[in-house]
Amino acid sequence: MKRVALLGMPNTGKSTLFNRLTGAHARVGNWPGLTVELLNARLIVGDQVVHMVDLPGIYDLHGYSDDERVVTQFLEQHAPDLIIFVLNTSQYERQLNLLSQVMAKSVPILLVLNMVDEVSAMGIHVDVATLSAKLQLPIHLLSAKYGQGVERLQPAVRQAFNETRSQPYLPALAEVEQAFSASIKVPAQASNATTEKLDKVLLHPVLGLPIFFAVMLLLFQGVFTIGKPLQDGATWLLGEFRLLVLEPLFAHLPMWAQGLLLDGIYNGLSTVASFVPLIVLFFLFMGIVEDTGYLSRAAFLMDALMAKFGLDGRSFVMLLMGFGCNVPALMGTRVIRSKGLRYLTMLTIPFSLCSARMQVFVFLIAALFTAEQAPWVLFSLYVMSIAMSIVTSLIFKRQYVNNDAFVLEMPPYRFPTVRQMALAGWQEVRHFLNRATRFIVIGVVMIWVLTNFPQDVEPGSVDSWAGQLGHWLQPLFQPIGINAELTLALLFGFIAKEIVIGSLAVIYGQEGAALVQTITQQITWVQAYSFMVFVLIYTPCVSTIATIRKETKSLGFTVLSVVWPLVAAWFITWVFYKTATALIA
């Protein structure tokens, strides 16, 4: 089987091209000799199966960041039959050094000049024949974003497989640069007027940050405004499905089996499933913000501020990535060359409000706050997550010092296509559902056992195993306003935050509107907010901890990443709870 590797710098559209070629068939896999996972897929090219691998975006083959080492190791240990080198044609100058390094590897290369839509709009002319002749490489022009020219890429790959070169051409960097300058004609006034006009406003030294936070607030408003009716509809459908289908279907089973299947597994899964519309909207809106190029601007705006706390703009980008899931954000720190900055960033990422936590917050916010209050409550939690990252970096920045300069290339503003948004959203939702389903089934079964045993006591009562455990931990959690039921949910939330809401459904033996009503009767808005603050800050999930251990290979740092959030969560929640109850008394 032929192996093809996609290689290029960040922001060249490499992953967009990979998604365009593979659709929803890509998967993450481990490679022997490598300690990371790479996205890969199998494609039919002509009459043969091709294994395509999406390598991390890098700047230099001879660099010392983790991603650069991964690419170098891959090329040495798993030599591809063909490298598709993806280049952003409108900003090609800084990419030529990497191209010359790759050409020196003597591996067949198909050079893809991407983003021809932008090149055309800027009046840039590319003489493909001249460039191909000078570099002695097959060259293909396309736009991965719009699919222009992509249909001709597979024949180009097949032709590249069949071409044999007696002696590879190994040009020096200067030769690669005379070649491009002779083949690409850029008008003297070539610019992106729309990008320049937007940047004057969005990168304004005074207005830039307020505008960014306003955009994020509008994003949360949109999630609740559009998503709440969809969530209510999903809750009703799932309730009717249980009533009309599952209860008659399982009626012949013993009571303990009905309880496990309906009150345990189904209640837990259906409660989580009802929030899928909100999760989809969140990822969709965040994807739009990211794909337009606005997140790069946010990193630029935050760089000077973050530097005062020992971080930089890259750290802020990783924190934003953590809003989806902490695990890929932690893995994304490989692009940071400074070990001190990377460790400090990894210590702050678990405070990012991930999608699993958001599910908990959306449930409680919708239950205990009005529609007008909801976006502000969620926004306050996002602000708190960033604040906790800043406080953490201030405390630990002397232990983990940054000795690396921050370089950021601003892409022009691009509005993503519907296909891009749908595919990116689907990948995030699929990842969320895979994690949620795997952990929730295990978690809710464990909780059902704890709440229903011993058999001679009332389920969920103080005499059950769950009640005894919650009662035993009350001296620790009662001072911060968290009752026995919420305490038990927190314990299982350590495995995965997706379990928290499902566990509450099992603990109370209810789902949907009945669960919401019960919770609103048992806790106040102050207790609910205290619970959310604790969930936001306390020890990250098992997957996050495992990733930190794997990425750092340091037991001491891993222990610190567990203990520090737990201590900070209790203290900050205690301060809020005592202050809030005193003010409203």
Image: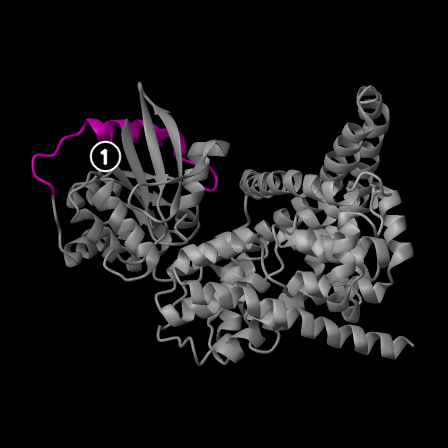
Q: Which residue is mark 1?
A: 81
Residue toward you, 102 or 181 = 102
Q: Is residue 446 above or below residue 390?
A: above
| Residue 425 in view (yes/no) | yes
Q: Is residue 462 magenta?
A: no
**How far across and how far down the image is residue 120, in percent?**
40, 47
548 lies left or right of 245: left
**How far across and how far down the image is residue 116, in percent?**
39, 45
Q: Is residue 162 magenta?
A: yes
Element at label 1: loop
- Within 10 angstroms of label 1, few (less than 14), some, or many (20 or more) residues? some
Q: Three-letter amino acid code at disc 1?
A: Asp
Identify the image quadrant of residue 49. top left
Residue at left 7%, top 34%? 166
Image quadrant holding the C terminus, namely bottom right
Magenta part of the chain: 144-168
Identify the image quadrant of residue 108. top left
